[in-house]
């Protein structure tokens, strides 16, 4: 018996078939579960050998009529869908950056039966600031990381922006660095991309628009040298 079969069985036991009746000819709960699994597969990012990060926050946009039908069972459904995601991640050996969270929102432009799913990989304790949490340079974090001076910044997001501006994930205090200077994207390989900076981005002494990163790669932003480490 697969995950989706188990999911349908648990739903039936949970609400004695009432939920299934409410959603007859409309959005099927099992369809939501299948789409969450597909979202995980589609957005899976290989960040290192044996470690694949997938989204852990899922926002499901539903029509007003379906939101109304769901109202009584919303909390139970969110918990069941999150459980399906966790089980699927275990089967596929996927990694979450934080706890699984499923949310329902209303889209007034949708008609009954329509839905979309948005997802993101969100660290467990993002706090109120976007800036990546630094650790001592020699500390092993289990994540690829950028090292600036004596400080190491674990790469826990699928995209990490470097720059001088307040909106950067890693702020670089250097007058030669643009407010939004470059962005590192997790994948296989990990890639750095210049964001149209004034002074450009160099990797191992070569100016690049976009380039893969290897362990020990030296990235220069303005006069600041950043070292990339695989783990």
Image (spheres, grey):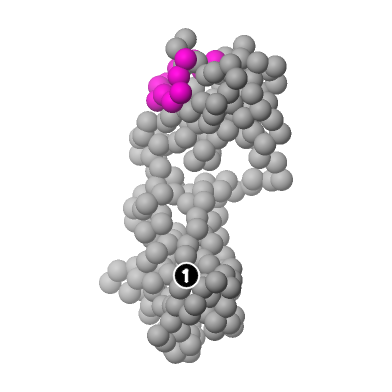
Residue at 66% across, 28% down: 179
Give the residue displayed 42% in from the left and 31% down from the top.
190
Question: Camera-side residue: 103 or 86?
Answer: 103
Residue 215 magenta-drawn?
Answer: yes
Residue 58 x/y as whole percent: 51, 60
> Is residue 55 shown left or right of residue 131?
left
Q: Position of residue 119 (x, y in %)?
A: 50, 55
Along the line of sight, which residue is nearer the eye, 229 or 202? 202
Q: Residue lying farthest left?
A: 1
Would residue 121 be visible to someone looking at this image?
A: yes
Task: Where is residue 162? Give x, y as percent.
Answer: 60, 28
Q: Within the magenta stretch, is there residue 181?
A: no
User: How many discs mark residues in the rendered view?
Assistant: 1
Question: Which residue does the image show at 59% across and 26% down from the upper left?
Answer: 181
User: Left or right of 184: which side holds 94?
Assistant: left
On the question of residue 73 being in view, the answer is no
| In the foreground, 76 or 159 | 159
Quadrant in which the N terminus appears: bottom left
Q: Residue at x 54, y 62 (%)?
A: 59
What crowding class fits label 1: few (fewer than 14 Cα within 10 Å), some (14-19), or many (20 or more)?
A: some
Q: Position of residue 140 (x, y in %)?
A: 52, 28
Question: Would you name the residue on which mark 1 appears?
Answer: 115
- On screen, residue 127 above or below 4: above
Q: Which residues are magenta?
A: 207-220
Q: Secondary structure at mark 1?
A: strand
Left or right placement of residue 213 versus residue 76 in this view: left
């Amino acid at each position: 018996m697969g995950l989706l079969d188990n999911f349908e069985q648990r739903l039936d036991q949970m609400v004695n078939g009432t939920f299934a009746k409410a959603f007859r000819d409309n959005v099927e709960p099992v369809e939501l579960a299948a789409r969450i699994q597909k979202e995980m597969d589609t957005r899976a990012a290989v960040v290192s050998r044996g470690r694949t990060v997938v989204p852990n926050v899922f926002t499901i946009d539903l029509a007003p009529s379906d939101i109304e039908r769901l109202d009584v069972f919303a909390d139970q459904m969110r918990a069941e869908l999150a459980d399906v995601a966790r089980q699927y991640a275990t089967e596929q050996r996927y990694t979450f950056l934080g706890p699984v969270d499923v949310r329902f929102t209303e889209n007034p432009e949708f008609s009954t039966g329509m839905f979309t799913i948005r997802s993101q990989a969100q660290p467990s304790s993002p706090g109120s600031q976007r800036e990546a949490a630094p650790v001592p340079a020699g500390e092993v974090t289990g994540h690829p990381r950028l090292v600036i001076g004596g400080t190491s910044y674990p790469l826990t997001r699928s995209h990490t922006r470097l720059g001088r501006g307040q909106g950067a994930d890693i702020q670089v205090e250097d007058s030669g660095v643009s407010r939004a200077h470059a962005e590192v994207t997790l994948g296989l390989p990990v890639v750095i991309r210049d964001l149209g900076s004034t002074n450009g981005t160099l990797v191992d002494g070569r100016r690049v628009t976009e380039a893969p990163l290897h362990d020990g790669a030296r990235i220069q932003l303005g006069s600041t040298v950043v070292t990339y480490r695989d783990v």
